[in-house]
Image: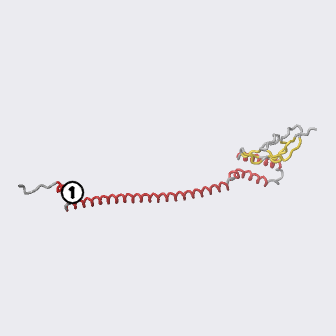
Amino acid sequence: MKSNKEPNANEEEVQQNEPELKTDSDKENSAAEVKEVLDENEKLLFAELETKNSRIAELENENKDLKETLLRKAAEFENYKRRTENELQNFVKYASESFVLSVLPVYTDFERSMEHIDDEGNTASFKEGIKLLFQKFIKIMEDQGVKKIEAKGQPFDFNFHEALMQKPAEDVPAHTVLDVLEPGFMLKDKVIKHAKVIVSQELSQS
């Protein structure tokens, strides 16, 4: 007879469902693995934090540089604006300098002529001197782009002439400039003073 009886099916199922008990060695290995994972995660977090802190420092430096550049550009623009305003003011203030310099010789010649206006026997030479001065002055004006408007005998043109009066005139077409009371002038292609004129009018039919 056999002394040990064979386990039945129910006993085998109970034995299979019983959990395996971990040894102390298994527990130590599991704890070491968890610690290793935690240490690795901590390293990753520290590395990421260090990267972000480094990027923040870079952005702060860039922001500082941009502020300094902006302030410098603003100061440079303010200096440029002030310098330009001063140059413009001086330009407006002394805009006529070149013209005045060109006229000064005429002024000097007139002054010399006036010093001898009362000298005896200088009538002819004085007249000649005045003519020369006038020609010099006309030349200066022409060099500056100033030209006299030729009006007498020309058809009336309101772009160049200002009619002060009209009067009948035979053998002259109507609306013709008969006489110039005050000459007009152009500066290059711009009329700066209209010629004041007398204009012929149509003769009444009797």
* Figure check: 196 above or below 4: above
Q: Quadrant of the C terminus?
A: top right
Question: How far across and how far down the image is residue 76, in percent?
Answer: 55, 57
Question: How far across and how far down the image is residue 131, in percent?
Answer: 79, 46
Q: Nearer the viewer, residue 94 or 58?
A: 58
Under mark 1, the amino acid is Asn
- Name which quarter of the figure residue 3 lies in: bottom left
Residue at (83, 52) in percent of width and height: 120
Q: Nearer the viewer, residue 24 or 183?
A: 24
Residue at (79, 54) in percent of width and height: 114
Q: Residue furthest top?
A: 171
Apparent side of residue 52 relative to residue 138 in the rendered image (left or right): left
Which residue is identified by label 1?
Answer: 17
* Figure check: 90 above or below 177: below
Question: How far across and how far down the image is residue 173, in percent?
Answer: 85, 38
**Mark 1, secondary structure of its residue:** helix
Apparent side of residue 83 relative to residue 206 in the rendered image (left or right): left
Residue at (42, 59) in percent of width and height: 56
Residue at (42, 58) in percent of width and height: 58
Q: Residue furthest left?
A: 1
Question: How far across and how far down the image is residue 65, in percent?
Answer: 47, 58
- Name which quarter of the figure residue 168 lies in: top right
Q: Quadrant of the N terminus?
A: bottom left
Q: Residue furthest front?
A: 1
* Mark 1, other Cα within 10 Å: few <14 / some 14–19 / many ≥20: few
* Figure check: 129 above or below 19: above
